[in-house]
Image (cartoon, coloured by chain):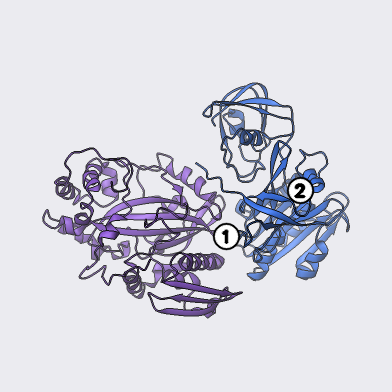
Chain colours: A blue, B purple
Amino acid sequence: MAVRPQSIKVRVAEVVPVTPLVKRFRFVPLAGGLLPAFSGGAHTVVEMHDGAVVRRNPYSLMGSPDELDSYQISVRKVEDSRGGSVFMHERVKAGDEMAVSPPVNLFAIAWDARKHLLLAGGIGITPFVSQMIQLDRSEMPFELHYCIRNDDRGPYWRDLQQRYGRRVQVHRAESGLGMDVEALLVMQPLGTHLFVCGPGPMIEGVYATARGLGWPEENLHSERFQAPATGAAFDVVLRRSSKRVHVGTHESLLEAIEAADVEAPYLCRGGACGQCETGVLACDGRLIHNDHYLSAEERAAGRKIMPCVSRFEGRELVLDL
Amino acid sequence: MTIAFRDETFRDDYTFRNSPHAIRRFPFPFHEDRYMYAVNIEPHALPGPKGSVVEFAFDVDEHYVSEMRDRELVLRQDPLRCQALPHMMAAQWDLLELIMTSFARDYPEHFSLERDGERWHWVNRPLGIDQRFVFGDALTLPYEPMEYVTRQAQGDWVIVDQRDGNLWMDAGMVTTQADWSLDFDIGMNFFEWHGPVPLAHELGVFERALKYLMQVRVGSPVRRLNWTMTINPLLDTAPERYPVWGPDRTTVTPDNVGHKAHLRVELQSFWRLPRSNALLFPIRCYLIKLEELVTVPKWARRLPRVLKSLPQELVDYKGLTRYRDTAVAWLSRYDDGAPTSPGGGPD
């Protein structure tokens, strides 16, 4: 049994354009007082009511963990996505009422690390903003390498350089990372933990380099921003709840299950944490696994699915829910 | 409500007793007439039933002052009962904040906390403490933050770090434990420190429990009960002190078992610490003499049935081997064979 916590009602206090594609949103609690404290790298899940559709997207909390009168997130607009970021950019205005989840951290500071080496690509900077506040305050060594396309496209780089000086290095390149990852990794002291947040190919490339250099798996941390894939609509049968649910083109399997009032556990909503793992009781067709959690053997066995990002194609899918 | 704190001992002359009020609110752990391991975790939804041990975040009861005196004696003898690895300092402050804010909110007649930014003023009336300090600056307290605050809070406190898909026992204050050692377990992961538990590994209990605990969220604590038995009301049954208390198990007779044997229940809860992302694991010990327990007819019927049907592996693991039969024989005089109602509470 997973406990689904109460969401927190908030008001949008401020919407600030940061770059042509990034807006920052500040939420204050409707009830007044303080929001729950959080740790560096934590995210909140923002509920968006778009007509009859309810979307829940995770965004890193990028304010200071010491200032809890508001939460701040930054959203990059992705035109061809399922619409969450477009909704945030085009429909959400200061004064609106919304709901957010209590904080969850799947990208936490490694308190036992000798040093934090932080690698951000574009909007992947957001979890590092709160991490660096905590690292700085705890007097823990860190170094941020921030890859941006150009000066206009990288959010917050000026502020961060001003605040942390030489601990923040900005790399500019219209394609690729614009930096030599291998040269950076070989010169790190033993006990360094590597944190990467950015597009999938960046994470995979950095991990491959680190593994090639013999970095221990325990010292590698990543968070990827992955919206649930869109795809053809399909039906699913939830055996324990005795329900048949339709999953539309632009909604995830998890969202369709939630819309049918069936409780399903989740944390990351990005196919990474494993919390929403669900048993497949029958499958006449093909499971489309979009997660980063199930092993190749588990996928081949076809007995499990991660409904936050994965889908189905075929005649009938029956889940243990 | 003002608590009348008892003046009693948990060693030497063993003057510990439960008042009738404390007996009624005892967390009797058996919800049916038999017992087996299960992942028996539920939300620690607050406030719980009025007057119960789960009404508030952390229970403060009539034994508070005497238990804190006993903790001080244990620490004087063996300072290694309180240890924190260096990377747990952020979690130590999380713990101090959680205990102080909870106590001040839930027991305002006994505790108060004033915060002016980082400058805090803490008053603990039952223990006569008035302390001003700077939150985040350990040098402004007489001990490190975890030790300071858990010298003022009943029960054991373990802080586990969450990393590499596992939980690591990296800090704790442990003086009221059921035969386990922080000094031995410190630095171990969830599977290592549960290594000695029989049967549960085969049931897959620990894999499920770990997955569940790693997703405990800020503001949504959970809890469970665990139990064993102890001869004499000894809070500190540490393996380091086994030569002192182990032989007590051979002193149980049909004449003294009602007075000497105690059901020992642990109220365990699990909390996500907000700024460190560590998991807090308070283990609060409650003791009740069998002669106190049989004053509740339902418990008098149920406990002998549970003990009689307990698998031998659990009898041995819990250290009941030498006196289980004596306890069952004595308790059975209070069992009239009538059916019992579901759930653990008194009828």
Camera-side residue: B148 or A221?
B148
Is residue B254 shown above or below B144? above
Does residue A18 appear in this view? Answer: yes
Residue that carries the numbered disc 1 in the rendered image: B274
Camera-side residue: B339 or B32?
B339
Chain containing the residue with disc 1: B
Amino acid type of the residue that numbered disc 1 sits on in the rendered structure:
Pro
Chain containing the residue with disc 2: A
Q: Which of the image's four quarters has the C terminus of chain A? A: top right
Looking at the picture, how far across and down is residue A293, in whole percent? 62, 40
Indicate left or right for B231 with A245 as reference.
left
Q: Residues within 10 Å of mark 1 (few under 14, many from 20)?
A: many
Does residue A214 appear in this view? Answer: no
Which residue shows up at 39% across the image and 56% down it? Answer: B50
Q: How many marks do you count on the picture?
A: 2
Label 2: state its secondary structure: helix
Which residue shows up at 77% across the image and 51% down it? Answer: A75
Closer to the eye: label 1 or 2: 1
Residue that carries the numbered disc 2 in the rendered image: A202
Which residue shows up at 35% across the image and 60% down it? Answer: B177
Indicate left or right for B195 with B346 as reference.
right
Residue B332 placement: quadrant? top left
Looking at the picture, how far across and down is residue A17, in whole percent? 83, 56
Labels 1 and 2 touching (C-beta < 8 A): no
Camera-side residue: A296 or A321?
A321
Looking at the picture, how far across and down is residue A282, in whole percent? 57, 23
Which residue shows up at 20% across the image and 49% down it? Answer: B324
